[in-house]
Amino acid sequence: MKIKILCTLGPASLRADVIKGLDERGIDLFRINLSHTPPERVLPTIELVRRYSNIPISLDTQGAQVRCGLMADGVVVDRGQRVELVAEPVQGTSGRFTLWPGSVFVGLRVGDSIRVDFDGALLQVAELGDGFAVATVLEPGMVRSNKAVNIDPHPNLAPVTDSDVRAIEIGAAAGVRHYCLSFASSAGDVELMRALVPEGSTIISKIESRAGVRNRDQIIDASDAVLIDRGDLSREVPVEYVPFYQKAIVRQANRWNRPVYVATNLLESMVNNRQPTIAEMNDIANTLLDGVHGLVLAAETAIGVDPCGAVDTVMRSIRAFEHTTFGNLLEEDRLRAV
């Protein structure tokens, strides 16, 4: 079985030389993240990639996710401060910023907690109005543009956004036949997605929430493949449990003969550096030993300092895995040749 490599496109990789370099390395799928690519940029991005590569492209939906809007640079909120959260698009400040989609305000309740980004500010809803809320800052932190927001309890959101639907229509017309469904929470979400994409398309359902974990069996059964996004999953379940959920989902997907991929923090250090840590290489090795069918590079290739170098690192790890399968460790002189 060939281990696949999926690469997320972004500012660091949407360049002719990088696209050509990734193509030469034989990666398997380019990923366009619709959380960072508005519908009007979808077709130009597809055309740019196809100018330099024939590797298939996937569109990755925003899905049932909350994000903050555009923020001024360096916005920090302090403990005890009150912040107004609004549905309308505004230039965010420490006193007022946007949450989208606007439908999130329908399900908000006083007392709900709101965490911005992985290690950002923690807020608690104190007041509610029509299309806005006022929250108190419980833990200070920075609030940056377009960062993911986790609300507890999780609001009931549509599995695809209006923006997703427009992007899917554009991608379908351009011949895209691979689609990732973000925050899949049920088989019904997968079937809704299947009704939107062209017949015969591959749907990769992303398991990255409590609901996704809870309903993983039906999601795996309804999907063509599944992707474990460990980053977003760690927002909803304690981080120490994420490795065990990963192993359980991989086992189930393999039992049902569904390809399964793993994303997030595979080579996080290579976002800023050209060499990985031994812990990252150990993580990749164990992920491969679990039985995954592919690895997904996200920030490493979207905004990293060396997208092609990150792919080279993953390829070396895959070659080592293939050579040492079943415990047949290489001789030292052969190790040097890998």
Image (cartoon, rainbow, N blue to C red):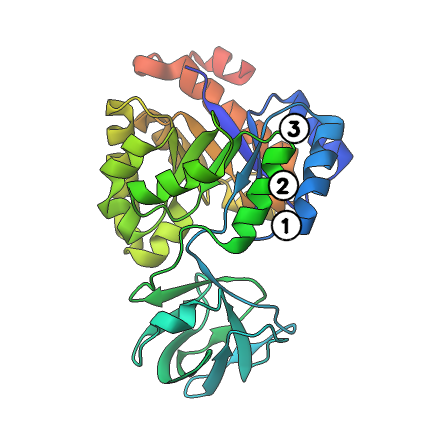
Query: What residue type is disc 1 on?
Result: Pro
Question: Which numbered disc flags the more N-terminal residue, 2 or 3?
Answer: 3
Q: Residues within 10 Å of mark 2 (few under 14, many from 20)?
A: some
Describe residue 229's horizontal placement relative to residue 315 as left or right: left
- The answer to whether any part of residue 328 appears in the image is yes
Please give the label number shown on residue 39.
Answer: 1
As displayed, is residue 184 above or below residue 90? above
Q: Which residue is mark 2?
A: 170
- Mark 1, secondary structure of its residue: helix
Q: Which image quarter: residue 243?
A: top left
Describe residue 321's horizontal placement relative to residue 11 as left or right: left
Camera-side residue of 301 and 85 = 85
Are the two marked residues, 1 and 3, in contact with CB atoms closer than 8 angstroms? no
The Cα–Cα distance between marks 2 and 3, rounded to whole angstroms, is 24 Å
Q: Which residue is mark 3?
A: 22
- Mark 2, secondary structure of its residue: helix
Q: Residues within 10 Å of mark 1 (few under 14, many from 20)?
A: some
Residue 232 position within the rendered picture, expressed as x and y whole percent measured from the top left: 40, 52
Describe residue 31's horizontal placement relative to residue 24 as left or right: left
The Cα–Cα distance between marks 1 and 2, rounded to whole angstroms, is 8 Å
